[in-house]
Structure formats: C-alpha cells, structure tokens
Image (cartoon, grey):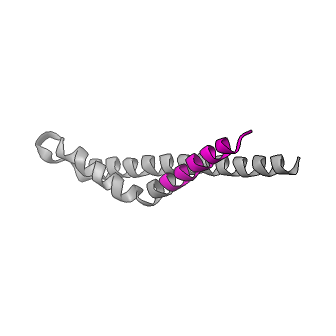
Amino acid sequence: MKKGFFQYVFIRASLLLIFGSVMIFQSGRIGTFLGDHWLRFQAGGSAPSVDYAFVTENFVRSIANVGIVLFTVGLLALFGVLIFQKHQSDA
C-alpha cells in the first residue's frame, strides 16, 4: 500500500484519539451545559431537581461513552496502521 494511505489513516486515527480524549475529560462540563439547556426549555424554566439530576447525569454518561468509542476506534486504527506498516517493511 502507498505511504500516503498510511499517513491519511494515521492522521485520522490521531484526531479520533484527541477528540475522544477531550470528550471523555470534558464530559462533565458538556453534560452540565446540555442539562442547563434542557432546563431552560422546560415549562417555566424549572423542573424538579431529581429530573434535572437524571437528565444531566445521562448527558454526561452519553458523552463519555461516545468519547470512549472514538478513543478506542482511533487507538485500534493507530495500532493497525503501525503493525501493518511494520509488516510491510519486514516483507
């Protein structure tokens, strides 16, 4: 395979790693922001605190899970490229 393809996949995998890491570590901040946004659009701009806590916690978990998936896909792609490139150079 061409070297350009390896560079393309390597860059994309690195971006997935970085973006996934940011989502994992900032999931609390992003989830709270989305929970506040949800609260603003409730009737009268208020909701029971139990509902707010439930919605915010689910936003945080969802964002963290998406970050974990992106991070894992990026990591697997990065290892795949490195192993395949090493295999090509050995042959």
* Relative image position of residue 86 (x, y in whole percent): 80, 52
Vertical placement of residue 46 versus 43, above or below: below
Q: Residue furthest left?
A: 44
Residue 84, position in %: x, y? 77, 46
Between 12 and 35, the one nearer to me in the picture = 12
Range drawn in magenta: 1-19
- Identity of the residue furthest to the right in this view: 91
In the rendered image, which quarter contains the N terminus? top right
Q: Residue at x 49, y 46 (%)?
A: 66
Query: Looking at the image, can residue 79 be seen?
Result: yes
Looking at the magenta stretch, what is its main secondary structure? helix
In the image, what residue occupies the spot 83% across and 50% down?
A: 89
Q: Residue furthest bottom?
A: 25
Please count the marks in the image.
0
In-image side of 89 versus 73 (left or right): right
Residue under the point 44% across and 46% down: 62
Measured as percent of width and height from the top left, residue 57 is found at: 37, 52
The residue under the point 49% across, 50% down is 67
Depicted 29 relative to depicted 52: above or below = below
Q: Is residue 71 left or right of residue 2?
A: left
Say whether residue 34 is magenta: no
Counting from the top left corner in percent of width and height, residue 72 is at 60, 49
Q: Note whether residue 68 is visible.
A: no
Magenta span contains residue 5 = yes
- The reply, left or right, for residue 37 in relation to residue 75 is left
